[in-house]
Each structure stands twice: as C-alpha cells, then as structure tokens.
Amino acid sequence: MLSLDVFRGLTITAMILVNNPGSWSYVYAPLSHAQWHGWTPTDLIFPFFIFIVGVSISLSVTVMQAKGLSQSAIVHSSAIRAAKLFALGLFLALFYFNFIADNYDWLEQRLYSIRLLGVLQRIAVVYLFCVLSYLYLPKKYFYAMGPLLLVLYAVLMLCVPYNDTQGNVYQGLLIKGNNLAAWVDHLLLTTNHVYDSSTHPFSFDPEGLLSTLPAVASCISGVAVGDYLQRATQNRTPLLPQVKMLLFWGLVLTSAGWLLDPVFPINKQLWSPSFVFLSSGIAILSLALCIYVIDHRGIKGWSAPFIVFGANSIAFYLFACIAERILIMVPVQGISLKAFLFSHVYQPLLGNYNGSLAWSLSFLIVSYVIFHYMYKKRIIWKV
C-alpha cells in the first residue's frame, strides 16, 4: 500500500522534526508535548506509529501465511524482531558520553542507571504481544481485547489503592508523579531506571509498564484497519467506499475520545483510554486522507520524500538519535557542537524560535540526502 508507506514516512518525519530542535528552550507550542493533561499534534506521533505497526502486522502476517509459513515460524521471526527492537532501544539509552564534564562517570551515570523502557522497547513489546494474540486468538476475541484492555486499565488506575513510603494511601489520582502507573514504575523499575526520576512521590516512565496495556489497544486498532482494507480489496470494494468507511470510524473514535475526556482526561504520558480513542481516530482519518489523495485521486508527486523515509523508518529513527547524540557529545569551546552551531549560526540569523525550527528542518534535509541515496541503491534496513 503506497498510502500506508507515505503515512509511515509522514509519521517518522514528524517524529524526527519534533525530536531535534536547535534548542529545547525555543520550541513552538504545536511541536512540544502537552505538559500533562491535554494534547498537541506532537502527542499524536508515537500512537500513530503504534497504529501503523498494527496495520503492518495484519498485512505481514497474511503474506507470511500465504507463503506457507507455520505459526511457530511466524512467532519465531516476530520474537527475533521484537528482541532486536528492544536491544536497539537499550543501545540508544547507553549511547552517550559527556566529554565536556571532567568528572563524568559513564558506568555510574549511564550503564548502572540505564532507562529500561523507551520508544523502541514499547514498540517491541506491543508488537510481539499483538502478533501472538493475532495468531492464537479468534478474530472476534482479538478485536474485543482492545476495549477490554482499556476498561481494565481505567479500572486499575481509578479504583486500585496504593501507598507511598510514608504510609499515605492514594486512589484514583491522575497527577504527574502520583498515579497508579507511576507507583508501579517506581516500585518495579525503581527511580534509577525510568525517564522521569524527579517527580514525587513516585518517579515514572511515560513508556512504563502499566501504560503499555492501552498502547496494545492502539496497535489492535491498526490491525483491525489492516484487516478491513484486506477484506475490502479481496471483495473488490472501490476505494471511495473504503475511504468513507474509514472516515466514519475515525470520526466515531475521535468523538469517543473527546466524550471520555471529562472522565479520564486525554493524556499521552498516561496513554489514557480517551487518548487511545482520540489518537486512533485521527490516525484512521489521516490514513483515509492518504488513501483518497494518493490511491484514489492519484496525486503522488508530493509523497516522494516520505516514501524514502518510510521505507527505512527504523534506520531513520536510529540515525537521527545517533547523529543528535554525536552533535551533543562533541565539545567546541566548552559547549557541545550542536549548541555552538545553533548559537553562532542559526540563532543570530533567524532568531530563537525560527532558528530552532530551521535546525530541525536542516537536519531533515541532510537526512533526506543520505536516505534518498540508500533508497536509490535499494539499501533497505529491516529489523
């Protein structure tokens, strides 16, 4: 599906754009995450990627089954892929050294306090769980698992009591650093191995343990859409009715997210049920728009850069993370190379916010040159 490839490319491009500003002090509001409750366009990027993983599961499993692969062979292949993704996430967590600080201890400050979970780790866990469930559960039970996980997560978050070290008992709180998901991360992952160790009374990880349950539901929504598109293709359903059906379900889910917001606020860091409905709905609407423009209307010229990035999405993500770390690690006149270039080139020429955005765009342009060459040479790096 060309439209799915373009949608993947758009998503990974947006992810790299928001992850690589010239300075985190100067980022336009739509390119920043919501502080806690609420959402911005940036908050939709990761769930879009999880949704696309779901669509890809539907398509790839069907292809593997058509080739005659057994379920055990598919599980083996999927487990290896998930293990590689998880390992790459750990590698990124370790790939940093502060050459500017004289007393920096990599073992103590990086290895011994490694962040155990993260973006690639969550993708790995969600991907493998969904593949196993998709293979071994009847379809109706697999689809039902999505809303059941959301209900389970909501009941746990709102009804299960928990306590801090002082003996204070809490229940149903959805405060940053004080909610059941944070308590689980604080207890099992410990303060040294989570993204945010400074929140009180509990440190937490936005890609933590308990919030992975609703992330699975996000992936299941993608699988359901992938299955629908395959059935529509097999039944020779014209593209326009497919687009209309996707628009309908996209609007239903988006509306459900808004309606649930007063009960369980839209929150990306908690991956709240309302956030799952909202992000999955907008993802379906976005995919429907891509199908309409690219596959139905045949307007494809604009999509070339996103096909290039989408074809090598994991490689692009890794490249961006590694390149960004290198620019931060290399010292120049007592500051990082990135800070030096931003403060001496981009900031004087374009100002604070425009200079920061220009840095991100420059990074994308350089990346496109590299990945366009790889695409032309048919160098596609798959995990």
Image (spheres, rainbow, N blue to C red):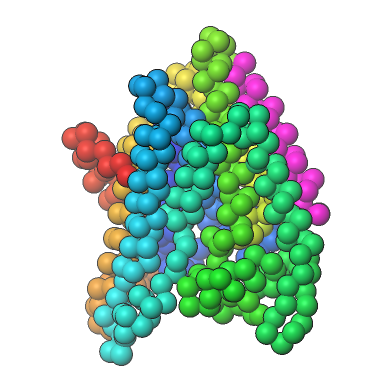
Q: Is residue 182 left or right of residue 379?
A: right
354 in magenta: no
Q: Position of residue 112 (x, y in %)?
A: 38, 78
Residue at x 76%, y 52% (from the top left corner): 261
Q: Position of residue 172 (x, y in %)?
A: 78, 65
Looking at the rendering, which quadrant does residue 161 occupy?
Answer: bottom right
Looking at the rendering, which quadrant does residue 145 occupy?
Answer: top right
Which residue reaches farthest left?
A: 377
Residue at x 30%, y 54% (from the top left corner): 319
Q: Nearer the viewer, residue 180 or 273?
A: 180
254 in magenta: yes
Q: Position of residue 37 (x, y in %)?
A: 69, 61
Q: Nearer the viewer, residue 154 or 347?
A: 154
Please, is residue 103 above or below residue 23 in the view? below
Which residue reaches farthest top?
A: 236
Magenta part, dominant SS: helix
Q: Which residues are magenta?
A: 241-264
Residue at x 26%, y 80% (from the top left corner): 99
- Can residue 355 be seen in this snapshot? no
Q: Is residue 298 left or right of residue 44?
A: left
